[in-house]
Image: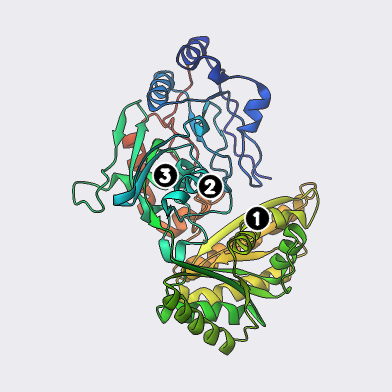
Amino acid sequence: MTNQQIGQPPALSEMLVAGLAAILGDRLSLNPTVLEQHGKGEAYHAAQTPQAVVFPNSTDEVAQAVALCAAHRVPIVPFGAGTSLEGNVQAVRGGVCFDMTGMNRIVAVNDADLDCTVEAGVTREDLNLFLRDKGLFFPIDPGANATLGGMASTRASGTNAVHYGTMRDNVLALKVVTADGRVIMTSTRARKSAAGYDLTRLFVGAEGTLGIITEVTLKLYGIPETVSAAVCPFDSLEGAVDTVVQAIQLGVPLARVELLDDVQIDAVNRWAGTDLAIRNTLFFEFHGSEGHVAEQIATVRAISGDNGGGDFQWASSTEERNRLWKARHQAYYAAIALRPGATGWSTDVCVPISRLAECITETRADLARSSIPTPMLGHVGDGNFHVIFVIDPTRPEEYAEAKALNAAMVARALAMGGTCTGEHGIGLGKIDWLEAELGEAVDLMKAVKMALDPQNIMNPGKIFRGVEALSASA
C-alpha cells in the first residue's frame, strides 16, 4: 500500500496547542486513537495521522483555529465522514485535522426558491430526511452517506447524476474560511450571476486545498409525482452499455441508470440478500408524471430488448425501491466482503458516452486476465464507471497488479478524451495522472493554489506535487 508521508513533521508547539484549547476547549483531541481514526478514508491508502484533531461547532471557531494554524505554519486537513476513496484526507505532513461533523445544522430551507443552506457536516441522508415532509429532496447520492461539505470538496456525484447533475451543478454558494482565517461567501442564492469570477466552482472540487467549506447552499427538487424502478439483466456488457447510450441519445430523461457486472451482482446478492440473476445488469429509475414515466419505460424496454436485455424486474413500492438502491449504494462493501480480510481499492474514470462501450469492454478484458476479484459498476448514463480491486493486504504483488490495471484503464480513458476521475477526486491516488490529462493547465492550478494559500498549509500534498512553501511549524 502507498504511503506518501513527507518526512516526520515537527512537533506542534505548546503555544499552538494552548491556543487551540482556548478556542475549542475539550473539542481538541491529542488522543492517539482519535488521531488514527482521522488518518485515512475508506480506500487502500495507508493511514497518515494528524497530530491533533479539532471539532469546531461554528464558522467563527473554524476561522479562529485556521488563523492560529496559519500563524504557526501548521498544516490543516479538513475531514467530514471519512468516506473518501483517493487518499483525500491523509495528513501527509501531520498538522491539525478539522473534523466538521459537529457543524451539522440545517441553516435554512427556502421552499419557494427550491434551495437550502446547510453546515458542512450535514450528511446527505440527514438532509433528505428533513426535506421529505416538505415534498423536496436533494438528489446527489454517492454510495456513502457523506457530508455535504465533503461532497462539495470532492465534486461528488452519484446514481442521479445522469438527470440531476453533480455537486458542481447543484451548489449555488459556499461559505469558506480561507487559508489566513478570513470568512468569505463565494456567491448568492441567485440561480445565475455574471458577477466576477466563479469562486463557487473554484472551491467545489478543491479537496480542501484552498480553504475550508463551512456552509453550502444547494439546489433542491420536488419529489416526483411518479417514481418507478427496475432491473434488467443482459447477455453482454456491450448490450447493457449500448442500451444506455441509445436511450440517452434518444433523449429519454432517465433519472438513474446504473451498470453492475456479473461479479458485482454476485457480491450484492451475497451481501444484501437479493436474488438478482448473476448477469451484467442495469438498474433503472424513472421520474415524472404517470404518463411520462410510462412513455419512458416503453422506450427503454424496447431498446433493451434489441440489445439482448431480459425481462424487467420491477421494484414497485417505496420499500422495494429503497431496498434495491440500498443494495446498489453498498456495492463497495459488498465487493470487499467477497474476500474476508481484503482491502478495497475503488477507482473510477469517465469518458464521452460514445466511447463508453469500447472503454468498458477493453477494461473488462484486462480484468478477466487478473487473479484479483474485480467487480465493475458505474453511473453509465454520464460515461462514468468504477472498478473495485479486492486486494489481499498481505500480498504486495496484488497491489502491484492492481496498480498496473488501474494505469491501463486511466490511460485508455484519457486516450478516448476522458478523465482520470469522474467523481472521487485526485487526492493522492490520481496525482500522477493529472498532468497527463490537463498538461500546462496544472501550472495555472498551482498558481491559484499559491495565490490563495501561499504557505501551502491547506491539505498539502494533494492534487499535485511541486508546491513546497510550507516551512517548519513553530
Observer-nearest residue: 1 or 375? 375
Q: Is residue 444 in view?
A: no
Badge 2 density bin: few <14, some 14–19, many ≥20, Cα 10 Å: some
Residue at left offset 48%, top offset 56%:
157
- Residue at 66% x, 70% y is 261
Q: Which of marks 2 and 3 is in front?
A: 2
Q: Of the residues shown, which amino acid type is indicated by label 1? A: Gln
Q: Which amino acid does label 2 sit on?
A: Glu
Query: Which color scheme did the rendering employ for the protein?
Result: rainbow
Does residue 145 appear to the left or right of 382 in the view shown?
A: right
Q: Is mark 1 on a helix, strand or loop?
A: loop
Task: State the mark number for residue 125.
Answer: 2
The x, y position of residue 426, in whole percent, is 50, 49
Q: Is residue 56 above or below residue 206?
A: above
The residue carrying mark 1 is: 330
Q: Distance between the residues labelled 1 and 2?
A: 14 Å
Q: Residue 306 carries which label?
A: none
Q: Which residue is drawn at 26% across and 43% down?
A: 188
CA separation in Å, label 1 and label 3: 26 Å
Identify the amino acid type marked 3.
Ala
Left or right for 323, reference 52: right
Q: Where residue 327 sits: x, y (%)?
A: 66, 59
Q: Where is residue 407 in the image (x, y as percent from the top left)?
A: 59, 60
Instruction: Give whichever of discs 2 and 3 has the lower sequence position.
Output: 2
Residue 387 appears in the picture as rendered: yes
Residue for point 64% across, 32% down:
37
Which element carries disc 3, helix, strand or loop? loop
| Front residue of 40 and 235 | 235
Q: In the rendering, at what x and y percent does residue 387 appear?
A: 63, 62
Measure the alpha-carbon separation of dots 2 and 3. 23 Å
What residue is shown with label 3? 206
Q: Which of 292 and 163 is in front in this view?
A: 292
